[in-house]
Amino acid sequence: MKMRVLLTAAAASLAATAYAAPLNYFEDFESYENGATSVPGWTYDGVNAPNLTIRVTSDTTNKVGDKSLAMVDSESILGTNLAARYEFDGQTKVIASLDLWVGSIPDSTATEFSVMLRAGTTELARLNISQSATNVREIKATFGTTPAQVIGNFDLDTQIPISITADAETDTWSVSVGGDVFSGNFRNNNTADAIDNLFLRFQGANNSSKMGSYYIDNVSLVPEPAMLGLVGLSGLLTLRRRSA
């Protein structure tokens, strides 16, 4: 009887652990109206219009589906940086995937579109997309305290599949670009107990370098390993049946 009670308690604990990780998110923006400026779960920063906008759009061909989330600065006037943030319950390990299209970007290293996984406002994993000169478009990753390294290139109006994995147990992250995988420590050797938000930011150092348009679709956020708790629970329940 004691063994059964212990196994039942352990199973209940594992079940609680498995279901304490509710993150299993996917967003393709197809269900929203064209022009929608609000999407549940997303928080927008720096939208002080009319030149700075974040909205669901169907007026571009730069996407797989009919609609995507557009982050656009359409005029070279003073404005703040654009950011879109999706917060979730803290996870030890997260895989974030999305499709990005760059419609336009200035020739300036001061302008970057960044995809990050963070703990609060602490940057853990960061990928930068920029154009340093005419037709020189680079994808850069920042590992530890080393300068950002070029890990790939991209074309305008072309799908850029991005997959980032952040692991708070080892304080490391990795990114897959074009089938190649790059990995290293969290940015600035930061540490974290958990990852809790996906952060997309479009920034420029001056007015003329801020213009650009970026389209996001097929966002996926999945805890990893998502099924270990359930596998462990299944094993305990099997052992309990055998001990009965």
Image (cartoon, rainbow, N blue to C red):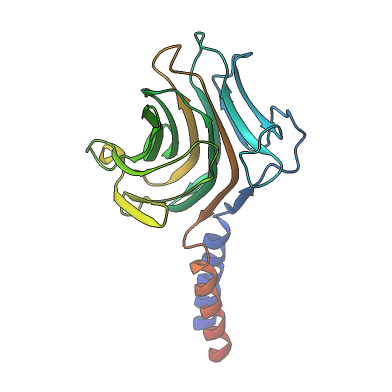
What residue is shown at x 49% (from left), y 35% (from top)? 199
Above or below — where is 29 with respect to 109? below
Task: Determine the residue positioned at 44% across, 23% down.
Answer: 106
Viewer-nearest residue: 128 or 220: 128
Residue 11 is situated, as x and y percent measured from the top left of the image, at 54, 72
Number of dots carrying numbers: 0
Q: Is residue 33 visible?
A: yes
User: x and y percent of residue 150 in the render?
Assistant: 31, 41
Tell me where residue 61 appears, x and y as whole percent.
65, 38
Q: Quadrant of the C terminus?
A: bottom right
Identify the residue at horizontal 56%, vertical 68% (top origin).
Answer: 12
Q: Given the current orientation, which residue lies at the most extreme left position? A: 146
Quadrant in the picture for residue 141: top left
Coordinates of residue 104 in the picture (x, y in percent): 52, 28
Q: Residue furthest top?
A: 78
Q: Is residue 242 left or right of residue 142?
A: right
Q: From the viewer's perspective, tell me whether residue 31 is left or right of residue 171.
A: right
Relative to 92, does residue 2 appear above or below in the rendering?
Answer: below
Asked if one can make out residue 1 in the rendered structure from this viewpoint, the answer is no
Q: Quadrant of the N terminus?
A: bottom right
| Quadrant of the image occupied by residue 34 | top right
Q: Residue at x 42, y 39 (%)?
A: 119
